[in-house]
Amino acid sequence: MRKKIGQRIGFSFLFLFLLITLLSLGTIIYFIVAKGAGAISWQFLTQSPKDAMTSGGVAPAIIGTFYLILGSIAFSFPLGLACAIYLCEYSPKGYIINIIRISINNLAGVPSVVFGLFGLAVFVKFFGFGVSILSGALTLGIMVLPQIISASQEALLAVPQSYREASFALGATPWKTIKKAVIPPALPGILTGVILSVGRVAGETAPIIFTAATLYKRGYPNSIFEEVMALPYHIYGLMTEGTHPAQQKEIAYGCAFILLVLVLSISFLAIIIRQRQRRKNG
Amino acid sequence: MDNNIRIEVKDVNFYYGKKSALQNVSMDIKKNKITAIIGPSGCGKSTLIRLFNRMNELIPNTKMEGTINLDGENIYSSKIDVVEVRRQIGMVFQKPNPFPKSIFENVAYGLRVNGIKDKKYIREKVEKSLKNAAIWEEVKNRLFDNALGLSGGQQQRLCIARALAVEPEVLLMDEPCSALDPTSTRKIEELVLDLKKKYTIVIVTHNMQQAARIADYTAFFMMGDLIEYDITDKIFTKPSKKVTEDYITGRFG
Ligand SMILES: Nc1ncnc2c1ncn2[C@@H]1O[C@H](COP(=O)(O)OP(=O)(O)O)[C@@H](O)[C@H]1O
Ligand SMILES: [Mg+2]
């Protein structure tokens, strides 16, 4: 009898914590939707800021964030996948590989502002790319690289050994085996990692402060060597600078709303891809 | 060299790390015959046949000693291309392991990875292999459905078709029926008997009746040693060793 009551109290607590979590999540979303959705209009999405950022739209920031996502993923996806393939499929299992694996996992925990400083030193200064889309995309790409490698590794390790054996037994080379028998079933897991990285790239501010972002820029960038506006940095700017805090705040919430919709729809996409593939793999 | 010998095993030892799994095994596998490998679980049956297509080298920390000749040529010689060896020796695994692809793509896989691009040839070869594996009638209207939707017995015959498509000379089967019901098992046994005309077959089996029903030769292993190897009839009626008799009469294992 006592045991049962104990259990019931335990589960009630767990439920309570779940409720608190859901509630705070719901509050955040409600808050941003309530304050931000009103700012959204066609003009907000398609025009440049006007009147010292107190009116007009945020289109350059949306476009800038889009470029940064595209650039960083174009860099980190192939590189991360290649690393994961090497670590899982080719490398001799051993001491050194284990150290590399642990280092990569630890890299995932490095604060993003440190990546920002690294990007400043290496891409902006050393390679001379300046404060630009290129520097920012590379910095963001390096930031999410560990995450992409880990997700890809996990996905590759989850592919049953029997697929590899079947492929080798049919006279496939190691490379063909990886390409045709291992990567296809691992792809949804790999893509999930990539898509979640897209969410991080879209939202991070610190890595682009010194490497890519600018508060205001006339028109759209013409090359990857130009600096850009970006949504998270735009929010930061609107809330910390300028002379019309009230109007700026409204625009900042509008930006936050756009970011939220972007990140949530990306996560949703990840879930759909995974579900579909799971059905396909029986 | 005896023209009727396809695989010649000479003084083979095999180790997983320090642990020995086969000791001093020598045996000849005859062309166009079915050779059964029997013995208690863990005696090295899988290890032996996986040496025939060099699958064991995918496992780290293993060591092989001795020679294995395929048609007189040592497949462990450094001049030999392992990919070529594996193409000549097909393998069917204990648990059916079709790829999560369509039935058609499963059978076409071996052709594609061997560089064959001719669509018509691939189509014909897929059909022929599925017919040879006695599964064509069951799948001909659903070739582009996912292979994982087939029953276990159908999946195993699909795996046989997949192995046959690359035209191997030898077919290795590692307890191909152990995960199957009696009806599927019977179908596969009939199929194996039929395939003997064109292929040399080595089949590992846990089931002694199965060995007695289909094999021409039977090898009995225990703890990594080849105890006795002879014509199947002889092994099952007049074994020359006491342990063999004990095993086939079910006194242990
Ligand atoms: N990958 C492996 N690593 C270490 N030992 C193994 C491995 N595979 C098999 N063995 C060992 O080798 C011996 C023979 O195994 P196996 O050839 O699979 O036997 P069988 O197929 O006759 O049941 C067993 O003792 C088994 O534990
Ligand atoms: Mg076995």
Image: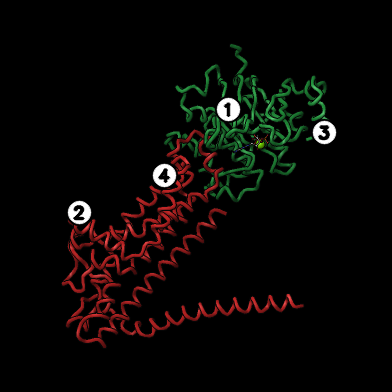
Disc 2 marks which amino acid?
Phe
Disc 3 marks which amino acid?
Gly
For the colour green, the matching chain is B
Residue B180 vertical position relative to residue A141 in the rendered view, above or below: above
The mark found on residue A127 in the picture is: 2
Residue B159 vertical position relative to residue B145 in the rendered view, above or below: above
Q: Chain of mark 4?
A: A
Q: Viewer-nearest of labels 1 and 2?
A: 2
Which residue is at a point 30% across and 68% down the rendered structure image? A206
Q: Viewer-nearest of labels 4 and 3?
A: 4
Disc 2 secondary structure class: loop
Residue holding disc 1: B52
Quadrant containing ligand 2 reads top right
Tell me how far mark 3 sits from mark 2, CA to CA: 76 Å
- Chain A shade in the render: red
Tell me how far mark 4 sits from mark 2, CA to CA: 27 Å
Q: Quadrant of the N terminus of chain B?
A: top right
- Asked if labels 1 and 2 share a chain, the reply is no
The mark found on residue B250 in the picture is: 3
Residue B163 vertical position relative to residue A126 in the rendered view, above or below: above
Give the image location of residue B239, x and y in percent: 80, 21
Q: Viewer-nearest of labels 1 and 4?
A: 4
Q: Chain of mark 2?
A: A
The mark found on residue A86 in the picture is: 4
Q: Is residue B229 something one can see in this rendering?
A: yes
Disc 4 marks which amino acid?
Tyr
Tell me how far mark 3 sits from mark 1, CA to CA: 29 Å
Answer whether labels 4 and 3 touch (C-beta < 8 Å). Answer: no
Which residue is at a point 64% across and 19% down the rendered structure image? B28
Q: Residues within 10 Å of mark 2 (few under 14, many from 20)?
A: few
Tell me how far mark 1 sits from mark 2, CA to CA: 54 Å
Which residue is at a point 69% across and 32% down the rendered structure image? B43
